[in-house]
Amino acid sequence: MEPEYDYLLAGSGAAGLSLAYHLSQEPRLQGKRVLLLEPAAKDQNDRTWSFWTDQPTPYDAVLAAEWRQLVFRSPQFAAVLPLRRYRYCTLRGLDFYRFVQAALAARPAQFTRVPAHVEELTNTPGGVRARTSAGEFTARYAFDSRPPQPVPRPDRRYLWQHFLGWEVEADFDAFDAATPVFMDFTVEQRQECRFVYVLPFGPRRALVEYTLFSGQLLPPAEYEAALRDYLATMLSGRPYRVVETETGAIPMTDHPFAARDGANIVNLGTRGGRVKASTGYAFLRMQQQAARLTAALAATGALPADLTGDQWQFRFFDTLLLDIMQRRGEQTRDIFAELFQRNPVERILDFLDERTSWPENLQVMNSVTPWPFLRSIGQVLIGQPGKRADR
């Protein structure tokens, strides 16, 4: 039997909605039937995405802000870093959801949205069958962005990027609206990688986020105390109001997430390895995958042979940094300080975006103290992730 739909999207977070938007904008696919299975309505400002780019994006009209310079701070190095080619952008979750929902609503014959939890996706000879809380559906291809539940492997590293962010407002000019703080490592490290991130939306309003890379989450009161201490210093004890809160925990791992599950199911988002393992940035990587999939489907009617375009060397670099974070998390501060002190900022952003050549990769690697990385290479070779010896 013919499948009911051409494409089925399991999940309507950033990854699923990004693919839906790209499909909606491709004229060659306007006759395709697309089903979105959404476990929950996306009608809250539940998160904020930031990214750097040197190209226009589909979401430029709804960005919360964009900047042309960044601040990096650590005890050994601090600087304002002008961006010549890149711009640093922030997008609020609710603005993104509304933007994509409007694009899909403009094509009611193409997109069907069903509130449902996907319980199982199964490859069939003609495509995919989805068993859901709203019944069964069939499609030619399925794109799965449900949160993964990987079985941990003893040779892999499993950390979290976890954070609490307060969007605060003051009655005085408290922030430099032209300059976000990319990383402020002057906070106490406590044998982990800890920093603060500040996105100024104006001189009196900013998102201030306390972020950690570590194996364990903190009690809520500990994040709150760290933010209060940071803001007390930053604002010289003057008052402020918390107008919005965001919190989260992003898996930071070199676990090998599969790009596909059988012939007709493609994994998206975290499930498809789109979270950059050493930084947690994912939004632009989701857009790149959505564009790659859409282009192949429009040109050939089939999935691309390479679903992600990932290169092995960058996965290896991520593994090394994760190993250092797991073994000596506080060393991460010094590594990033050396990177930003000894390289043009554009080279570092290219490197983190996996756009650098081998000569540029060598320049980046030669700019940091080698011993922590050599130690982690040894851990990779013996197949045993590094562990902290003094705990």
Image (cartoon, rainbow, N blue to C red):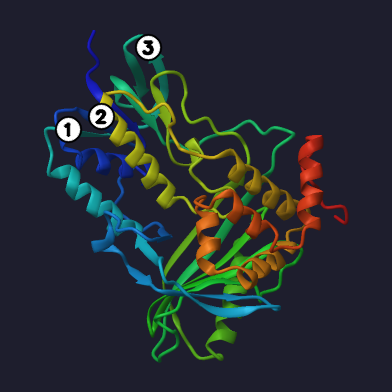
CB of mark 2 within 8 Å of CB of mark 1? yes
Q: Tag 2's secondary structure?
A: helix
Q: In the rendered view, does 113 fall on the left or right side of 167?
A: left
Mark 1 lies on residue: 28
Mark 2 or mark 1, which has the lower sequence index?
1
Sort mark 3 into few (<14), some (14-19) or many (20+) by Cα contacts within 10 Å.
some
Q: Is residue 151 visible?
A: yes
Mark 1 or mark 3, which has the lower sequence index?
1
Q: Is residue 16 visible?
A: no
Sort mark 1 into few (<14), some (14-19) or many (20+) by Cα contacts within 10 Å.
some
Inspect the image, locate mark 2, and give the three-letter code of the amino acid beneath it: Ala
- Give the number of marks: 3
Inspect the image, locate mark 3, and give the three-letter code of the amino acid beneath it: Thr
Give 155 or 374, whichever is nearer the viewer.
Answer: 374
Give 237 or 102, whichever is nearer the viewer.
Answer: 102
> Percent position (x, y) of residue 163?
55, 61
Where, by quadrant of the figure, is residue 279 drawn? bottom right
Mark 3 lies on residue: 124
Q: Tag 3's secondary structure?
A: strand
> Percent position (x, y) of residue 239?
48, 88
Q: Tag 1's secondary structure?
A: helix
Inspect the image, locate mark 1, and give the three-letter code of the amino acid beneath it: Arg
Give 18 or 85, whichever is nearer the viewer.
Answer: 85
Q: In the rendered view, does 210 fall on the left or right side of 63?
A: right
| Residue 299's disc number | 2
